[in-house]
Image: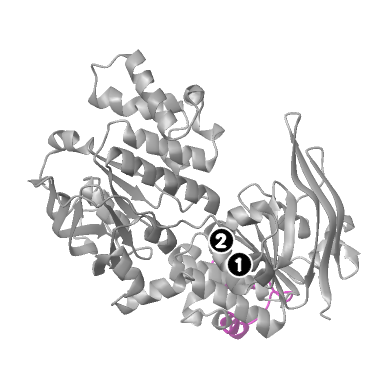
Amino acid sequence: MKRRILKIENLNVRFYLNRNELQAVKNSSFDIYEGECLAIVGESGSGKSVTALSIMKLINENAGTFINGKISFENQNILKLNEEALRKIRGKRISMIFQEPMTSLNPLHNIRKQIKECFINEYEDDQRLIALLKEVGIDNAKEKLDHYPHQLSGGQRQRIMIAMAIANKPNLLIADEPTTALDVTIQKQILELLDKLRKKFNMSLLLITHDLSIVKKISHRVCVMKKGIIVENNTTNSLFINPKHPYTKKLLDSEPKKKEFKSKSSKIILSASNLNVFYDSNRSFFFKKKSDSFHAVKDINFKVKVGETLGIVGESGSGKSSVAQAILKLIKSSGNLFFHGKNISNLTDNRFREIRKNIQIIFQDPFASLSPRLTIGKIIGEGLEVHRKNLSKEKIEKEVFKLLQKVNLEPEMINRYPHEFSGGQRQRIAIARALILEPELIILDEPTSALDMTVQLQIIDLLLELQRNLNLTYIFISHDLKIIKAISDNILVMKSGRIIESNSSKKIFSKPKNNYTKKLLDSAFF
């Protein structure tokens, strides 16, 4: 029988704001044993992260926060410890890594200084630091000690966070959504690293995530949380084979599934010929000097048929979003773009405005792309005010009402602001804004990456329904291969600005030809 590292009994966390009570965690109980990986899964707002922060006592009881229950670590109730006693545990016996390493690392200090701060003895020499960086798979470790966070990739920054977390060989490592912001290949590397370190140091791992494919891969046991309550607690195998709770079944069934519609048209709506995108670097506002160019998109060619979905996949920096922005003339490009057979590459902004209403884009983060100062009625109707100035306010409002119903939102919401909606609702608003001008082609740039799995499924179902009913054509950009598989007819695989493989979705997933494509598929845990 393995030794129990942590025992949580009847944990309750309540927040009070403007006389409103939010019960974030309700009577939660679970154990973590030596050397095991326990996963806590659930949607945003289910209480996963609040539970993790409570274990570190990073949530303190005060006038606006109420915490009770028992968190036993080494025969001590963490909730009863003072700050001096907690300092002996935090970062030494229990460590934590967070979702976004860029916000966790200090941009003003180099990596050497930040890792040294984690050691009990802050005067550790560089050899110890280099050995630690090598342990987490950092190449050129000696050189990286002098780097600042902005000089590292997302995967490297997360490895630095892991190095800091394991510096003192903790008994328990809490990983709160450690791979959410990373590409699939980097996700796999980080998860394999965490699993390797768990085994090497016989360390317990508490993994918090909403991605069930991750859970299936590395966890031993799973707690499923919904609205602050642990609705199911079981071994990973048992939970995936025979889930008991309806919510668990819903989560397991939330993976997008391919849906076939009638055969697509043979008519080409958009094509690109020798499309190139260059970005100037080292450009100075004050000094005119010859600048270097970064070749982001390199001589790519593709065609999109009316009514189909073209998926574009690849890691960060592969050129996916640059292609989307070039099509919309949001950035400069060279080569030729044809829309319904007409060359739109060299059109002036005024002449392209008529085309642009037929080509719309939906971005990754709807909260960032929706103005916080405008009601959703104004946001959705804004396109009509620009392109159809003869319409009255009453007519515009009527069109907005229709669209809200099409995207499954209540028309009564028209006077609310973006901050009053959930992530999934905000993305529906972004979809409505794109549809208001009745476009033929919609470009979707990572539209589901910031959403929970169940909400992702709802958005994908909505997009497929709209495509079928309105005969829409999509260009769908993503690094999530499960979503690409569910929605795409044809796929472009991009790497370093080039298309390295292009084929039907079926052939890409069944018989990939390029080694990079095979690597992407292998990383997605299919």
Residue 44: horizontal and vertical position, in percent? 61, 49
Q: Is residue 438 left or right of residue 269?
A: right
> Which of the 4 image quadrants contains residue 4?
bottom right
Name which residue type carries label 2.
Asp
Residue 72: horizontal and vertical position, in percent? 86, 64
Which residue is painted at 23% across and 62% down in the image?
297
Q: Magenta includes 124?
A: yes
Q: Is residue 516 left or right of residue 127?
A: left
**Colour mapping:** one colour
Q: Is residue 70 left or right of residue 51?
A: right
What is the C-alpha distance between the residues marked 2 and 1? Answer: 7 Å
SS for dot 2: loop
SS for dot 1: helix
Q: Are marks 2 and 1 in contact (CB under 8 Å)?
A: yes
Magenta span: 110-132
Residue 284 seen in the figure: no
Residue beneath label 2, please? 211
- The residue nearer to you, when weighing 258 against 73, is 258
Name which residue type carries label 1.
Val
Q: Which mark is residue 305?
A: none
Residue 522: horizontal and vertical position, in percent? 43, 75
Residue beneath label 1, please? 215
Which residue is painted at 81% across and 72% down in the image?
5
Q: Is residue 158 above or below residue 131?
A: above
